[in-house]
Image: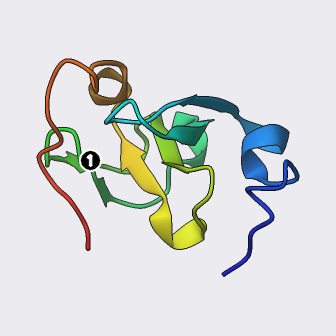
C-alpha cells in the first residue's frame, strides 16, 4: 500500500480538498467528479443507490488510506453525511 497520501503528496492535495469523514473522526481526501468524467456506475454508501454514468458526484477516501478505500458519493449524500448514518460499509 502506498502512503503517498499521508505524506502530503497524494491526490487530496493535487486534485481535491480535505474534509471530515462520515464519522467526523478522520480526515478524508475529497474530489469532485464532473458529469463528463463520470463513466461508470457506482453505489453510494450514503443511500445505497446507484450513481449512473453521466452524473456528477464526489469521490472520498481516508487521507491515510489507499486507492482501494475510495468511495463514490452523491453530492447530497456526502453533504448530509454528518446528519445520517452510512447505509453501506465495505470490509
Q: Position of residue 17 (x, y in %)?
A: 69, 30
Residue at 50%, 45% in the rendered image: 59
Residue at 49%, 58% in the rendered image: 70
Q: Position of residue 51 (x, y in %)?
A: 29, 46
Left or right of 10? Residue 39 is left
Looking at the picture, tell me which residue is in the foreground, 52 or 58: 58
Q: Is residue 82 above or below residue 71?
A: above
Left or right of 1? Residue 28 is left
Left or right of 69? Residue 32 is right
Q: What residue would you read off at disc 1?
A: 44
Residue at 21%, 39% in the rendered image: 46
Q: Is residue 58 above or below residue 51?
A: above
Q: Secondary structure at mark 1?
A: loop
For the N terminus, give its image quadrant.
bottom right
Residue at 20%, 59% in the rendered image: 89
Visual colour scheme: rainbow
Left or right of 53? Residue 13 is right
Q: Is residue 9 above or below residue 13?
A: below
Q: Position of residue 73 (x, y in %)?
A: 36, 41
For the C terminus, give its image quadrant.
bottom left
Q: Residues within 10 Å of mark 1 (few under 14, many from 20)?
A: many
Q: Position of residue 79 (x, y in %)?
A: 36, 19
Amino acid at each position: 500500500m502506498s502512503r503517498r497520501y499521508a505524506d502530503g503528496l497524494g491526490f487530496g492535495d493535487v486534485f481535491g480538498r480535505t474534509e471530515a469523514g462520515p464519522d467526523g473522526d478522520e480526515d478524508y481526501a475529497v474530489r469532485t467528479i464532473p458529469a463528463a468524467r463520470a463513466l461508470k456506475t457506482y453505489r453510494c454508501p450514503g443511500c445505497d443507490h446507484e450513481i449512473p454514468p453521466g452524473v456528477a458526484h464526489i469521490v472520498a477516501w481516508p487521507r491515510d488510506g489507499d486507492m482501494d478505500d475510495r468511495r463514490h458519493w452523491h453530492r447530497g449524500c456526502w453533504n448530509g453525511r454528518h446528519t445520517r448514518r452510512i447505509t453501506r460499509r465495505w470490509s
